[in-house]
Amino acid sequence: MTNTIERENKFTSGLYVKRPIALVRGQGALVWDETGREYIDCVAGQGSANLGHCHPAVVKAVTEQVQTLITCTEMFYYAGRAELEQRLVEAAGEGFNRVFLCNSGAEAVEGSLKLARYATGRTEFVAAKRGFHGRTMGALSATWNKKYRDAFLPLVPGFQHVTYNNLEELRAAVSEKTAGVILEVVQGEGGVYPGTPEFLRGAQEICREKGALLILDEVQTGFCRTGKMFAYQHYGLRPDLLALAKSIGGGIPMGAIVIGERIRQLEPAIHANTFGGNPVTSAAALAALDAYEEERLAEKAAALGANLAAKLRAIGSPLIREVRGLGLMVGIELKQKATPYIAALAERGVLVLPAGLNVIRLLPPLVITQPQLDTVAEQIAAVLAQRHAE
Ligand SMILES: *Cc1c(COP(=O)(O)O)cnc(C)c1O
């Protein structure tokens, strides 16, 4: 074992399931480990590297910003933050008018739940089975998986979970006490399940009818991943609160809530954080937004994703139950546990994620090239063929 792996094993929290690879460098869709081995990275920092590793525009923006102003609390005004807030509101489209900046996905979700309670004066929430929204107490209360919840009970009261894509269950759960319905547009962690148009549009209608807010968690689906800037734009939705993080800063840690017009004016100091709207993360996010647009990464994700899904379906392995997804968010559901195949892929130079027990999840950087993506599909075919033959 290498020095790095030994050291981390000794001193890390122990909370992560680790793989025996120590990364040292990344460029675009590629990463290299300390032995010099190259990998195509379809983990992409759990979907935080939509722009790939070390995107030159992000590197330049961060480098310049750390030499100018490294921190600036929201107590003071700051031009880069102002521009970012405007750009996020414009990117989210009609119906949005303000932004709250924070540091992670869980924090964006947590804040959204608080703002929904504040805006409605109600306390209850409806979330979905298989849904994942983060690990802080509020976000965890919206998260479904028992494995993440059970050691931390009791969680925040007032959450119910309905079957995703089942509109009747959702309708029955939403009442005059419901502050908000929180959903992913494509369930990521839970197994890469895209929402149906009937369910998502129906959810919005039910929210409007009952005076509840529609909270969309686009932490994983945001920033061109699914073939649009935000996945709800495929469905013509108008959420009230939009939780963002992962790829917002081109790989630099950051989160945001884009706030809809139906949320009443917020009183100063009811919610806040120290690092939100930091100049360095704001500079990274502005550079990232430019890159998403200039490199037309939404269109690219749609085209590459369709092509990848077709190639994966054409594998025709009896081990594959289903290939599904939206854009470059792709799940391959197997009829057996995904872990051995994920390890075999790493040995062949392709890094991928699990989603639940049986699903191989691919979140490649959107800057991945067609030949790199073809290699990914070929290697997946190879490991499925090999394992099947064993
Ligand atoms: C990753 C993720 C989160 C949590 O984000 P963190 O930055 O890890 O707190 C929340 N919601 C969804 C949909 C996610 O994919």
Image: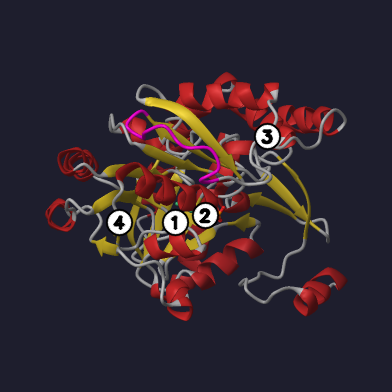
- Residue type at mark 3 is Met
Q: Is residue 275 above or below residue 67?
A: below
Quarter occupied by the N terminus: bottom right
Does mark 2's beta carbon lie closer than 8 Å to ligand 1? Answer: yes
Q: Please give the residue where the numbered disc 4 appears in the rendered image.
A: 125
From the Cβ of disc 1, is ligand 1 less than 8 Å away? yes
Which segment did they paint magenta? 261-271
Residue 314 within the segment the image draws in magenta: no
- Give the secondary structure at mark 1: loop
Are discs 4 and 2 less than 8 Å apart at CB?
Answer: no
Q: Pointers 1 and 2 in contact (CB under 8 A)?
A: yes
Q: Earlier in the sequence, mark 1 or mark 3?
A: 3
Element at badge 3? loop
Q: Is residue 351 left or right of residue 134?
A: right
State the residue at coordinates (72%, 49%): 31
- In the rendering, which numbered label is found on residue 133? 1
Residue at mark 3: 75
For residue 159, side relative to residue 390 (left or right): left
